[in-house]
Every structure is written in C-alpha cells, then in structure tokens.
Amino acid sequence: MGKSKEKNLVALDGRTGEGGGQVVRVAVALAALTGTPLRIDNVRGNREGHRGGGLKAQHVSCIRTLADATDAEVIGCQVGSKSFQFKAKRSPAEIVNRNIKVRAESAASVLLVFQATLPFLLFAGDENGSPITLTIQGGTNVSFSLSFEYLDQVLLPSLERFGIKVERKLEYRGWSHGTREIGSIRFSIAPLRPGQSLQAPIWPSEPGMISKINVSLVVPKDLQKLLQKSLLFELDLVFPGVEIIFVVIDDSRHKARNYTLLVAHTDNGLRFGRDWLYDGKTKDKTSDQLSTEISQKVVYALDAEIRKGGLVDEYLQDQLIVFQALAEGKSIIPGTLEARTSDREHIDRTDKPFGDGSLHTTTARWVASELLPQIKWVDRGRICEGAGWTAESAKVESSAEAFQSFTISERTI
C-alpha cells in the first residue's frame, strides 16, 4: 500500500466557494482508501441563501456508503450537519459485499455518490478478478452535478486511459426538476488486482481538430424536433462542416425537464463536453424561443471551451484529479492553452487550493495533496507525479502508524 508521511492536525481555511462539496467528496473518498481519520468542520460554511451550508443529501449518501464499506466510525453524518468525523476500520482489500446497493437521500445525485466511491472500490480487487456491482438509486439528471450522459460519454471513456474499466446501465432516470423522481444506475466495476496501481494516462499533447459533435437531448416530445433544428442551425454557424450526430433523444415527460449535452470529439481521441439542465423559466415562452435559448447557450459554451486550447474540459479536469494523484508516474492534462504551453518547473505549494482551472479543480488538488502528501504537483498543477497507490491485502490497522487524523476547516469568509 502507498505510504504517507506522518501528519499532524491541520486546519485549512476553506475559502473554497463552490468547491465546498468537492472538499467532502474528495476527502471522504481518499480517507476511506488510505485509512486516514478525518474531520471536516464548517462544511460548506460560506454558503448562503436557499442552497445553504452543511452536508447535503448527496454528501450524506457518499459518507454512509463508504462507512458501510469500511465499517467506519462516523460522527455528525446527517443532512445540514456543519461538522463530521470519519474513521475507516476496513481497507478495500477487506471489503465484504461485492454487490452494493445504495438508495440516495431524496433525489440526490447518483453520480456524486459514484464519484466518491469509485476510488475506494477500484482498489478492492481480489486474486480472482471478481467484479463489484454497484447500484445507486437517486437523481440521474439533477442540478449542480454530472448527468448520466456526461459520465457515459466523457468521464468514463477518459478514465479508460488510466486503466479503469466500468460498465454502466441507466435503468431509469431520476430528476430534481419538475415532479421529483428517483432513478437508478447500475455499475459493474473491474477493480485492480492486489499489487497493481493505476497507470499514468497517455494523453495527447495537442487538442486536435474536431471530427464530430454528438448531441444528447432529454426534453419533452413536443420540443424535440424544434430543438434539433435549432441546434443544427447554431452548430453550423459556429462549427461549419463538422458532422453532427444525435446519439440520445429521450422524452423527459415534464415541461420543466430540459437537458442538452454536446460532446465534441477530436481526431486524436479527446472529448470536450458542455451541457445544460435548463434552470430558467419556461412560462410565457414559446417552444421556438425555448429551443433558441437552449441551443445558443450550449453551443456557445462548447465553443468557449474549445477556444481555451486545453486538453480537457472544465468539468472533466476536476474529476481526473483524484486519479492523477493515485496513479503511478507523471500525468500532464492542462485545461488551457496558457497552461499547455507553459514550461515552468516550479514545485507547487499545496497548503490551500492551487493551480490553474476551476475552483473545483484547485480544491480537489489541495485536498488530494493533504491526504496523499507524497504526490508532487508542478507548474500550477500542469504536471502531477502520482502516489502510485497499489491494491494489496494490507489492513487499515497495519498502516495506522503512518497516519494521524487531520482536520479540514471550511470557515466562513
């Protein structure tokens, strides 16, 4: 098992803004994997208004799922809690249940629960190569979270570069918009065998040229044809001559549920996604007006993403941080032209969110560095020299001396 230097209690000023939920997800995932006792205070403490602070339903589902898998001691794990503690007692090698079923609180995001549990389950392999089945019920298309379509078309194909294999099936959709519904996704995960580690991904050094754009629409039936027509018009204006393929056209069964995803494929195998789960008001808008509004926003957002000149889109970049940190070897996955063409070799300070990218990305780097201090980041996060964490049969207790609990404090600004 990868080793971590001894750690003292650490209080970190959590001026993480939108990265508050990212702190919970990444920290609990790595605490479960490494056996590090964890406490997070003032959870999402700088949130005001209707979104509030404290643990949300999806955070509680993430913590409880990993607590069950690790037989963890948990304190303060309930919706709204501003502080909680987590201490795993069981390593991935000691996992008992290989057919895991999770029902998320309310319409909490299935994908956030999956993101938190995947790093742990990847290292739960046995000598027989037995798969792990994970079925999660909750929201599949919800606000402030990845959709199943983005996971299926962008995230999981990208994780294959690390040697990660996950089969997935959308059993039925769950929505936070309109009448709330609980959905379900079934995953089959191929864990690493004992002694194996994730491989550093072979990532192209140039974005390449766009070869096609795949479109996914999950909207009411009466909007589908108009939205297809509007998207084709806007895409032809911005990406003339590029092949457009409608890969998903589903009925959302409610006028408040309008989801659109564009995925640009390049000729060297990269994928760039931009989507929108419509959050505007549909009242007093004609179908033509709504189609135009949705089309213009997602097309221009994809264009802006491509123009950044990076090798990864904003959403994918923050999802890859944990796997870069765990992998063996060096990975370079910059998100902008400036970062891609930089040649600075300065080692980054990791005592607060750092580097290029969104607040979610910089927060993920910071938290990963606190739990895996042996990793090294260079040139504002452009280069990651991973920990080379391995899957083996060591128990959490066997490495207890290597860890001391630490505190992440998300203080109000």
Image (cartoon, rainbow, N blue to C red):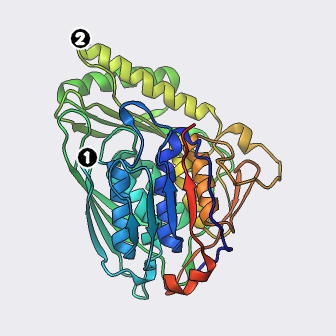
Q: Amino acid at mark 1?
A: Ala
Q: Foreground: 203 or 61?
A: 61
In this picture, residue 172 sits left or right of residue 291: left
Q: Which residue is mark 1?
A: 107
Location of the C terminus (image quadrant): top right
Whole-percent x and y of residue 253?
16, 34
Q: Amino acid at mark 2?
A: Asp
Q: Mark 1 or mark 2, which is nearer to you?
A: 1
Badge number at residue 4: none
Q: Foreground: 302 or 40?
A: 40
Taking 139 as reference, is 376 above or below it? below
Badge number at residue 284: 2
* Residue drawn at point x = 67 percent, y = 74 percent: 6
Q: Considering the numbered disc 1 on the image, is that residue within a helix, a strand or a loop?
A: loop
Q: Foreground: 233 or 219?
A: 219
Whole-percent x and y of residue 187?
32, 63
Location of the N terminus (image quadrant): bottom right
Q: Residues within 10 Å of mark 2 (few under 14, many from 20)?
A: few
**Corner quadrant of residue 190:** bottom left
**Corner quadrant of residue 188:** bottom left
Mark 2 or mark 1, which is nearer the start of the sequence? 1
* Residue drawn at point x = 46 percent, y = 79 percent: 91
Whole-percent x and y of residue 140?
29, 47
